Structure formats: structure tokens, C-alpha cells
Image (cartoon, helix red, strand yellow):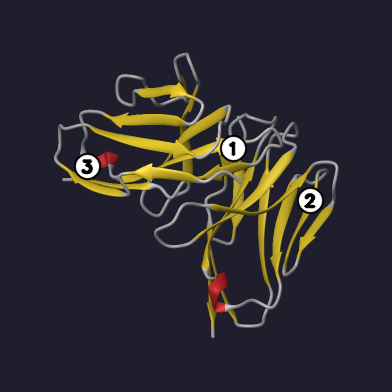
């Protein structure tokens, strides 16, 4: 499986600021995804990061709040904009294979004060 | 859309006992069913999966069974060890590359 890294691993941010999370994969992948995991909860898909085109957002998530970039087949960023305490979560990127499997990165633990 | 229910939400067993976690789903078009293990402070790790053309799959102490008619699938862990303690998530998927829909998770505790 691909090796996935995320930066930062954790951060504490002030209300109203923005944070950009990076996801790096050690091989080229077609499918990359961003998930949110609120404290003690399950995983919810934010969007599919499409290489060379705009991300595809799930219901309840909008580009202005969670802009995503995917400049190439090994890298993507997720920005959490104008943060509030409700944005405190773990943010996870994942990559998909042609055989259905999805592998997750280690996550970015965000606390908003 | 797809709805995945997972039971139980917490499960405590003695070391060496078996653990069973069950998920039910609503969309009959789902055809891929992975299980993830998430340890504290880490991302989810894919531990086993099953496709709709298979009824059971085994990998050492872990097995997954699928009943497509009843729309449920289960994770079985035998001879549990303390290092099996984690949160386990089931998920479903309709087509390769499409979204995963997750269950709510089961906190498994294996007591030594």
C-alpha cells in the first residue's frame, strides 16, 4: 500500500484563522479524498480531490470553507478557513486504488480555541 | 443514500475470547465492505475486506462474513490479544473509487 504523510500532525489555532493541511503520497494515485472525524465520532467524507480540476464536495461541505488543491498525482492540500471551535476535529486524507481499497494517512489533529 | 449501522458501540472481552462486530447496510448496490482498525492517535488501518461475490474471508485470527440477502456483514476476531484493543469501523462502497460510508465504530477493549 502507498505511504501517506500529513503535515502538520496537530495544531492549535485561534478562532477566525485558517489552516492548510498537506497530504503527500509516495506514489502516483488517481483518487484522493479528505475526511473529517469529529471527537469520538466516525469518519465523514468532505470531498474528493480531483487532479487538475475542482474538488467534488459532499453535501454540507462547501469550497469557501474547505478549499482543496490537487496540483499533481502525489500531493493535495485542504484548507480549513475562518475556523471556529466546531471545526476541532481530526482531518484525514486517503488514497484509493483500482481494487476498491482506501488507505488513510495518520491524520491532522486540529483544536480551535 | 447509504446508511450503515454498527453494533455494539462498545465491546469488552477477556484475552483469548472471541469478539464479533456486526454491521447492516441499506443500499443493495453496495459491493465492497472493508473493516478498519483505528488505534489512539493514528489514522484508520485497513485490516480486512470482502467483496459481494464472496461469503467469507479469513486472515489469521480475523474473518469477515457477508450476507447480501440480509444486508449485513460481520467482523470476527478469535483469540483476542490486548493489542487488538482499538476502535473498529465497518464501511461500504458501491463502485471502485467512490465514497466509503462508515459505521459509527466499535470500541473494543481486550482485558488481560
Reading the image, the residue beneath label 1 is: B100
Q: Is residue A93 above or below residue B47?
A: above
How far separated are the C-alphas under marks 3 and 1? Answer: 26 Å
- Residue B66 is marked as 2
Q: Chain of mark 1?
A: B
Residue placed most toward the observer, B83 or B105: B83
Q: Residue at x 54, y 78 (%)?
A: B82
Q: Position of residue B88 (x, y in %)?
A: 56, 58
Specify which label sits upstream in the sequence, 2 or 1.
Answer: 2
Q: Chain of mark 3?
A: A
Label 3 residue SS: helix
The label nearer to you, 2 versus 1, is 1
**B79 sits to left or right of B89:** right
- The mark total stands at 3
Residue B106: which quarter of the image?
A: bottom right
Q: Position of residue A21 (x, y in %)?
A: 33, 36
How far separated are the C-alphas under marks 2 and 1? Answer: 17 Å
Reading the image, the residue beneath label 3 is: A85
User: Is disc 3 surrounded by few (<14), some (14 to 19) or many (20+) residues within 10 Å?
Assistant: some
Q: Is residue B10 above or below residue A91?
A: below
How far separated are the C-alphas under marks 3 and 2? Answer: 40 Å
Amino acid at each position: 500500500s502507498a505511504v501517506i504523510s500529513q503535515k502538520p500532525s496537530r495544531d492549535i489555532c485561534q478562532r477566525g484563522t485558517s489552516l492548510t493541511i498537506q497530504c503527500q503520497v509516495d506514489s502516483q494515485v488517481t483518487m484522493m479524498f479528505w475526511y473529517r472525524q469529529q471527537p469520538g465520532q466516525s469518519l465523514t467524507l468532505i470531498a474528493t480531490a480531483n487532479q487538475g480540476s475542482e474538488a467534488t464536495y459532499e453535501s454540507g461541505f462547501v469550497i469557501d470553507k474547505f478549499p482543496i488543491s490537487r496540483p499533481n498525482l502525489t500531493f493535495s492540500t485542504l484548507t480549513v478557513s475562518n475556523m471556529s471551535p466546531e471545526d476541532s476535529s481530526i482531518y484525514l486524507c486517503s488514497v484509493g486504488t483500482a481494487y476498491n481499497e482506501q488507505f488513510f494517512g495518520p491524520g491532522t489533529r486540529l483544536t480551535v480555541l | 443514500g447509504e446508511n450503515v449501522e454498527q453494533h455494539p458501540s462498545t465491546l469488552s472481552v477477556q484475552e483469548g475470547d472471541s469478539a464479533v462486530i456486526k454491521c447492516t447496510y441499506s443500499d443493495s448496490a453496495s459491493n465492497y465492505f472493508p473493516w478498519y482498525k483505528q488505534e489512539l492517535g493514528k489514522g484508520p488501518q485497513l485490516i480486512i475486506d470482502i467483496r459481494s461475490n464472496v461469503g467469507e474471508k479469513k486472515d489469521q485470527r480475523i474473518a469477515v462474513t457477508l450476507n447480501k440477502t440480509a444486508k449485513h456483514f460481520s467482523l470476527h476476531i478469535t483469540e483476542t490479544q490486548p493489542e487488538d484493543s482499538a476502535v473498529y469501523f465497518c464501511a461500504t462502497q458501491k463502485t471502485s473509487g467512490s465514497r466509503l460510508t462508515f459505521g459509527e465504530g466499535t470500541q473494543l477493549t481486550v482485558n488481560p
